[in-house]
């Protein structure tokens, strides 16, 4: 039995082309408990509990980019969207309504709270709850109605929106690469923005893999 057949026998694949470990990882990533859902590292450590932390950090991101795993996640996402009659664009728009809501839209020019049916869609989507407190007036007077409006958490919505758009990871990577580039340029004495500079740094063993893409 050759090596390929031995691997296939040891790691059988299902109809989606996934091994048991890959299946567990993918299902946790897309629909697992909230504490691990969408967290590749946490999902990997549950799917492969014997793996060392250093291994999990590397392999979790690789597994997420695996074509078979990516195709499976995409198909499940599309099926869920079709069943719920919702798509990613709608979700992003709703998050944006909360994240960029302006409390001033709740009031008219005189500072009075607008009737709930008169609220613009943008601010109505940001309202989490409305509580009406009825305070009895003195004899012969009408009761006083106090309205308490609770809005959804803006920062939480912006964080989810930023993560979905990959904004924070990109900024973090840019900061790390920028600082490391400056350090490597000081050590090698050559600018990494030029092909010759990268070649020199690579020959000296100082060039990380991702710098091979710089300047292309």
Image (cartoon, rainbow, N blue to C red):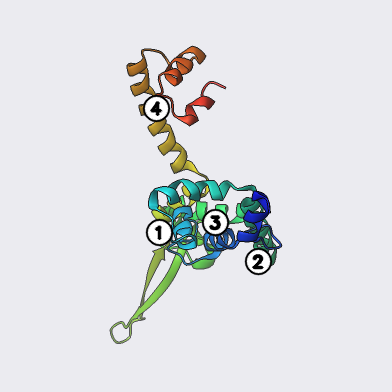
Q: Quadrant of residue 42?
A: bottom left
Q: Which residue is mark 1?
A: 153
Taking the view exactly as shown, the residue that stands out farthest to the bottom is: 139
Mark 1 and mark 4: Cα distance apart in space: 33 Å
Considering the numbered disc 3 on the image, is that residue within a helix, a strand or a loop? Answer: helix
- Mark 1 in CB contact with mark 3 (< 8 angstroms): no
Q: Position of residue 41 (x, y in %)?
A: 45, 53
- Residue that appears at 66% across and 56% down: 8
Q: Are marks 1 and 4 in contact (CB under 8 Å)?
A: no
Locate the C terminus and report the quarter of the image it occupies: top right
Q: Nearer the viewer, residue 125 or 94?
A: 94
Residue 146: where, in percent of width, then height? 36, 73
Answer with left or right where residue 81 lies relative to residue 129.
right
**Residue at image mark 2:** 84
Q: Quadrant of residue 172?
A: top left
Q: Is residue 34 left or right of residue 2?
A: left
Determine which of the numbered discs, if any, sits on residue 209 in the image. Answer: none
Residue tagged by mark 4? Answer: 178
**Mark 1 residue crowding within 10 angstroms, few (<14) / some (14–19) / many (20+):** few
**In the rendered image, the vertical position of residue 131 relative to residue 186, given as above or below:** below
Q: Residue at x 71, y 62 (%)?
A: 15
Q: Earlier in the sequence, mark 3 or mark 4?
A: 3
Q: Which one is closest to the eye, mark 3 or mark 4?
A: 4
Residue 101 in sight from this viewpoint: no
Image quadrant where one finds the N terminus: bottom right
Circles 2 and 4: CB atoms closer than 8 Å: no
Q: Report the front residue among 122 and 197.
A: 197
Label number found at residue 94: 3
Residue lying farthest left? 138
């Amino acid at each position: 039995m050759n090596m390929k057949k031995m691997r296939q026998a040891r790691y059988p694949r299902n109809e989606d082309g996934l091994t048991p470990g890959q299946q567990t990882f993918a299902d946790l990533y897309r629909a697992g408990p909230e504490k691990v859902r969408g967290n590749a590292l946490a999902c990997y450590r549950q799917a492969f509990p014997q793996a060392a932390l250093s291994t999990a950090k590397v392999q979790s991101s690789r597994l997420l980019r695996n074509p078979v795993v990516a195709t499976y996640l995409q198909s499940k996402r599309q099926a869920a969207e079709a069943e719920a009659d919702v798509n990613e664009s709608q979700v992003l728009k709703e998050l944006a309504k909360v994240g960029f809501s302006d409390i001033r839209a709740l009031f008219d020019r005189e500072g009075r709270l607008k009737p709930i049916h008169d609220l613009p869609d943008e601010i109505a989507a940001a309202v989490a709850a409305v509580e009406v407190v009825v305070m009895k007036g003195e004899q012969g007077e009408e009761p006083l109605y106090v309205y308490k409006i609770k809005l959804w958490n803006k920062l939480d919505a912006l964080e989810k929106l930023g993560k979905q758009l990959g904004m924070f990871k990109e900024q973090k990577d840019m900061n790390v690469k920028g600082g490391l580039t400056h350090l490597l340029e000081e050590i090698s004495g050559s600018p990494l923005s030029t092909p010759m500079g990268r070649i020199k740094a690579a020959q000296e063993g100082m060039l990380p893999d991702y710098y091979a893409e710089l300047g292309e």
